[in-house]
Image: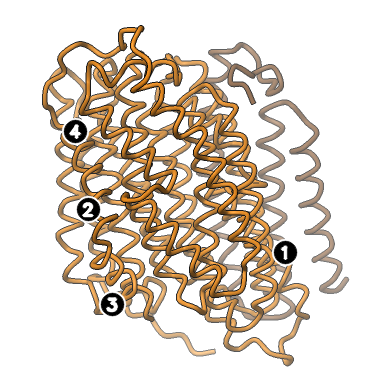
Amino acid sequence: MDFTIPDVNFISFAPEVILLLFATILLFVQSGSGRRGVCALLAFLALVSNILMTPFYWGKGIEGFGGLIIRDNFSIMCQTMIIVAVILVIVYSYQYLVFEEKNLGEYYTLLLTSVVGMNIMIASTNLMVIFMGMEILSMSLYVLVAFFKTVREGMEASIKYFLLGAFASAIFLLGISFFYGASGKTGLDAFVMFDATSKLTVPFFFVGISLIMVGLGFKIASVPFHMWAPDAYEGAPTSVASFLSVAPKIAGMAVIFRVGIEMSKYFPEVMLTIIAFMAVTSMIVGNFAAMRQSGLVRMLAYSGIAQVGYMMISLLAIPQGGGSALLFYLSIYVLMNMGAFGIAVLLSKKKDKRVQINDLKGLAGEHPVIAFTMAVFMLSLAGIPPTGGFFAKFYVFTHGIEAGYLWVVIIAVITTVASLYYYFRVIVFMYMTEEEAGILPKNIGINLFNFALIVAALLIIVLGVIPGSLLELAQQAVVF
Amino acid sequence: MGFYHFLSLGIILFAIGVVGFVIRNNTIVLLLSVELMLNSVNLIFVAFSRYLYGTEGQIYVFIIMTIAAAEVAVGLAIVVSIYRLFGTLDISKIKLLKG
């Protein structure tokens, strides 16, 4: 076995290096009054510089570290979604962390390092590298969830999230070891050399893939591995919860998609059975559990679990081009879920206060614009035209039917109808009740926060009316 | 002592870790169980690489050991804060969040 030094192509890794540089600088920002803006601005600069670099990478398929990092269009698109989500998180945090002056630099450092972890996860096809990225992401998030050290709910959420996350990564790792045992490689391209001459039997391989799917199922909070999600979201600082509900799901779905492409070429039935099971149970459990919730964040957590189920339908149709449906759904999901969590951040004034759905009572009377944006987010999550959520669901469902999974789509439609109940309850509370004065101050005026919410709502409507350009991008992104 | 001995030892250790994680309540013991699981995976990697393939698998062990150490560092920090706040490490007594 001859040893060659792999070609470390620095260009392929430049966005992560920039993020890490800014993360290091942020560690040196001392806490004190007036540093809130400095920290947020530095993190914002890092992310904007990353977004500005994407046109340069688009369509080139740059590889680095001897093929361990691949910047194809798919990874660029997923990374851009994550960066958009993190920019929204920074806007929320700037508003939300007013009462916490300590350790602000560390907060933004951890946000940036978790983005690095997700970028690595998305941009690799080697399971060991994916595992490294997953751990960088998870460890940053464990600490972020525990950011308010004195809030009991937050620490409880953190220990639960940490223990179950560590358990899941151990299972994921066992899956990698079985995969390695079956093929002698950890790259997903090991499927190519997989045939009857392989040293171990096929069952080994199937066990490996199943365990890997369990580990990823934890990260995207799909049923039956979802039990940490509602607790973690509710206990975490609300701005972190918004991040937690969007970004790791994008990264996890991207990895599942990459595994699914290879699997659908060689052993389609195994992968499809696992995905169909996870999709159906997620939709049923997520939607019906969300109905019983009185807390806004908890309701959104279960709704997120259901949304993962809808996304997974597109994975059933990978040979029929389900990847573009997945990317379209994810891009709309980033906007609508971040927006809905933004309202929760706006309503949570104290750090240990949980937002209830009742708190939304009479919001439309005093703050018509904010109520309107929340209504758009809810309608989009429910999948009502003319919002982007409708088109995303429609596109995913048509792909599911094309792939011959009519029964899954029928269940999805039924659960969508059921989900109207809890999404519309929020709208009814905002518009039909008048008595209680909202917990928001009378005049909040126009600030960055409102501006971000309005932009997100308008984007959702625009993408619902003219989805063509985004769809075209998504279709370009899944051509390998 | 052949390949299957080492493989079964690894799987049995992993199973012990899983059982410990499920039935115990002390947070420190849960952390130890996770560590046991990670290290049994190390053993499986070494067994595969020693008997079937090249040295690649033994290099993964170093990566996994590093990650395990980092994970314990984060975990113990959280555990210390938990003990300060709740005065107990029993995970079944820490249930402010319903569900």
Mark 2, residue position: A462
Of badges 1 and 2, nearer the viewer stands 2
Q: CA distance from mark 4 to mark 2?
A: 32 Å
> Along the horizontal axis of the image, is A209 left or right of A413?
right
Q: Position of residue B88 (x, y in %)?
A: 65, 15
Mark 4 vs mark 1: in front: 4
Instruction: Label 1: state its secondary structure.
Output: helix
Amino acid marked by disc 4: Cys
Give the Cα separation between the discs numbered 1 and 2: 52 Å
Nearest the viewer among B49 and A383 is A383
Q: CA distance from mark 4 to mark 3?
A: 32 Å
Determine contact: label 3, label 2, CB under 8 Å: no
Q: CA distance from mark 4 to mark 1?
A: 44 Å
Instruction: Identify residue for label 4.
Output: A39
Q: Residue at x 72, y 41 (%)?
A: B33
Q: Which residue is mark 3?
A: A62
The N terminus of chain B, quarter of image: bottom right
